[in-house]
Amino acid sequence: EWGRRAVELTPFPVVFSFPIRCFLGEVGVEEWIRSISLLGAWVVLVGALVALVWRRGTRVYSGVGI
C-alpha cells in the first residue's frame, strides 16, 4: 500500500494514464484538479532544482578566453 501511494505522488501516472482516462470520461472534477495540482507542484519543484543547479554551474564555470 505504501508503494502504491508513493507511485501516485510521482508525475508518471498523471502523464501516462490520466489523458487516456480523461478521454474515456472516467475522471471527475475533483480528481482532475488533484492531478493538475500534482503536476504543477512537480513543475515548480523541478524548476527550482534546475534553477539551483544552473546558478551553481554558472558560478563554477570558467571558459578559456572569456
Image (tube, rainbow, N blue to C red):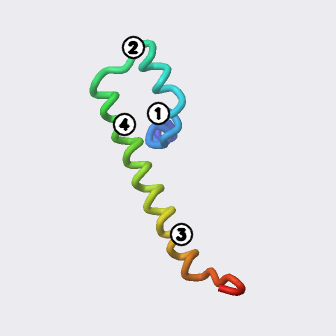
Residue at the image point whose x is 43% and y is 49% from the top: 43
Inspect the image, locate mark 2, and give the three-letter code of the amino acid beneath it.
Answer: Gly
Task: Tell me: residue 23, above or below residue 5.
Answer: above
Q: What separation in Å lies between label 3 and label 2 (alpha carbons)? A: 41 Å
Residue closest to the eye, 62 or 2: 62
Q: Position of residue 22 (x, y in %)?
A: 42, 20
Write down the residue under mark 2. 25
Circle 3: is it few (<14), some (14-19), or many (20+) Cα within 10 Å?
Answer: few
Verify CB contact (< 8 Å) between mark 3 and mark 2: no
Q: Residue at x 38, y 45 (%)?
A: 40
Front tag of 3 and 4 = 3
- According to the picture, the residue beneath numbered tag 4 turns out to be 36
The type of residue carrying mark 1 is: Val
Residue 14 has which mark?
A: 1
For the residues labelled 4 and 2, the Cα–Cα distance comes to: 16 Å
Q: Position of residue 66 (x, y in %)?
A: 65, 85
Q: CA distance from mark 1 to mark 3?
A: 27 Å
- Mark 1 vs mark 3: in front: 3
Residue beneath the point at 37% across and 20% down:
27
Q: Element type at marker 1? A: helix
Q: Earlier in the sequence, mark 1 or mark 4?
A: 1
Would residue 37 be found to the left or right of residue 22 on screen? left
* Numbered circle sitting on residue 48: none
Q: Which label's residue is closer to the chain start, 3 or 4?
A: 4
Q: Is 6 or 25 nearer to us in this picture?
A: 25
Q: Which mark is residue 54?
A: 3
